Amino acid sequence: MGELYAPSREKNNGAFSARDIISVAGMRYASRESSNSTDDYMRTYNVMRVGDIAFEGHTSNEFAFGRFVENDLGDGIISHVFVVLRPLPGRRYDLAFWKEAIHDEFLMKRILARSTKRSTMMHEIVVPDFLKEVVAVPSLSEQQKIGQFFSTLDSLIAAAERQEALLRQKKQAYLQLMFPQEGETQPRLRSNGFSGDWEQRQLGEVAEVVIGQSPEGRYSSDNQNGVALAQGNTDIADGVFVPRVWTSRPTKVVPAGTLLVSVRAPVGDVAVTPVPACIGRGFAGIPGNSFLRYSLERLKTSGHWNRVSSGSVLDAITSKELLQTPISIATNQEEQCIGKFFTRLDHLIGIVGRHAETLRTMKRAYSQRMFI
C-alpha cells in the first residue's frame, strides 16, 4: 500500500467553502451550510481530491473494521477527523477499479483487521501499519476492464433502485388520491363508473380488532410445533410478517391472512401474516381484505397514527384510539377495484426490488471472484 498511497496533509487554505464539504459516508457534497462555516474553522478541514481515499471508521454488519471510500466526485474538503491518503504521483490508476477495490470488504477485511485499532466508538486506521500491507494489483488495462464492469453493474443497480423508489413514491401519492382526505367524503381520483359519497365508519365497527398481549415464555428459534411470535416492527419485511421466533405457549393467536398493525413505535406499519401468529403488545390483529389493508396504510402516510399516538417513552396507539380510527367505506365493487390496483402495484414494486437485490448479490459474488 505504501507503494500506492501516501498520507495527505493538505489543509484548506481558504480556497474551499462550506459548499465544498464532502459527506464521506455517502461520497456526495453535503449541500448545506455548516453551522461552523467561519473562515478559520474551514481551514481545519482536510482537502480531498479526486482519487484520494478516506477512512471511515464506523463498523457495521457489512464492514467489520470500518471502510475506505474513494473520491470519484470532485475536489472538496472533509472533516479533520478523517485520515486522507493520496495516490503517489507517477502511478497510473483506474479510478473505477480502485473505487471498488479499496471499498470491498472481501479484499480489505483482512488488511483492516491488521491495520486498525478499536477506539471508543469506532475503529481508527494505523497508517504506518496500513502502508505496510500488501495487495495484488493487476495491469492498468485489466484495472480498466474490471473498473468498467463494476461501473456498469453499479449503473444497473442504481437504475433499479431509482425505479423502486419511484414506484414507492407513486404508491404513496395514489394512497392519498384514491381514498377520501380527512373531512372529505369522496376520493379525488376514481376509476371509471364509480361516483357518490363513501360511508364514514370507525374501525371497531367494520372489523373485530384483536389487541396483542405479552406472550408467555418458552421461545424457540426453531418451530417445534409452536406458533409464530409477532412482537414488533422488526418482524415485518415489505408488508409481510416474517416468522423468526416461535412459542409453545401462545396467548393471543390470529389466523393466517390477518392484518397486523404495529401499535408501538414506530406506529402504523401494516403487514399480513402468512401463518397463524401469536401477537404481542406491539401489534393488533385485524381480519380484513386488501381494501382495508390499504386503508390502514393510507393512515400511516397521512400522519394520522402519529397524531393520535402518545407515550412518555415510546409512541403507542391505545386500544380506544385504534377502535375509533376513522375508516371510509366504498361499495363492494369499488373496494375490490382499489384493492386489486394496490395489490398489483405492490407486486410490481416487489419484482423491481428483487431485481435490485439480485444485482447487488451478483456484485458481491463477482467482487469475491475478481479481486485477490
Image (spheres, rainbow, N blue to C red):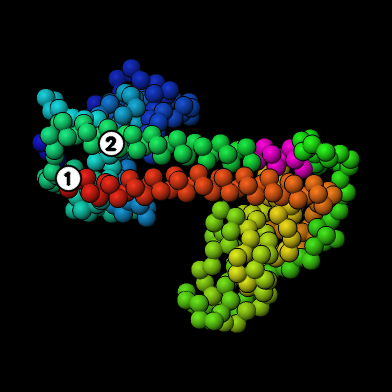
Q: Is residue 98 visible?
A: no
User: In the image shown, does 23 or 181 lie closer to the viewer?
Assistant: 181
Identify residue type, mark 1. Answer: Phe
Q: Position of residue 220 (x, y in %)?
A: 49, 77
Q: Which residue is mark 2?
A: 149
Bounds of the magenta span?
Answer: 172-179
Identify residue type, mark 2. Answer: Phe
Q: Residue at x 70, y 42 (%)?
A: 175
Query: How many neighbours does mark 2 have within 10 angstroms: few (below 14), some (14-19), or many (20 or more)?
Result: some
Q: Are marks 1 and 2 in contact (CB under 8 Å)?
A: no
Q: Residue at x 76, y 35 (%)?
A: 189
The nearer-to-camera label among 1 and 2 is: 2
Give the structural element (helix, strand or loop) at label 2.
helix
Question: Relative to residue 18, is residue 191 depicted above or below?
Answer: below
User: In the image shown, does 311 or 192 lie closer to the viewer?
Assistant: 192
Q: Is residue 358 visible?
A: yes
Identify the main secondary structure in magenta.
Answer: helix
Question: Relative to residue 54, is residue 222 depicted above or below?
Answer: below
Q: Which residue is mark 1?
A: 130
Q: Quadrant of residue 284?
A: bottom right
Q: Position of residue 120 (x, y in %)?
A: 34, 53
Q: Residue at x 66, y 64 (%)?
A: 257
Q: Quadrant of residue 277?
A: bottom right
In the visual, does 358 lie left or right of 306?
A: left
Quick check: is 367 in the magenta stretch? no
Marks counted in the figure total: 2
User: In the image shown, does 251 or 125 lie closer to the viewer?
Assistant: 251
Give the structural element (helix, strand or loop) at label 1.
helix
Q: Position of residue 11 (x, y in %)?
A: 27, 26
Tell me the CA gap for discs 1 and 2: 27 Å
Question: Relative to residue 175, is residue 201 depicted above or below?
Answer: below
- Mark 1 / mark 2, whichever is N-terminal: 1
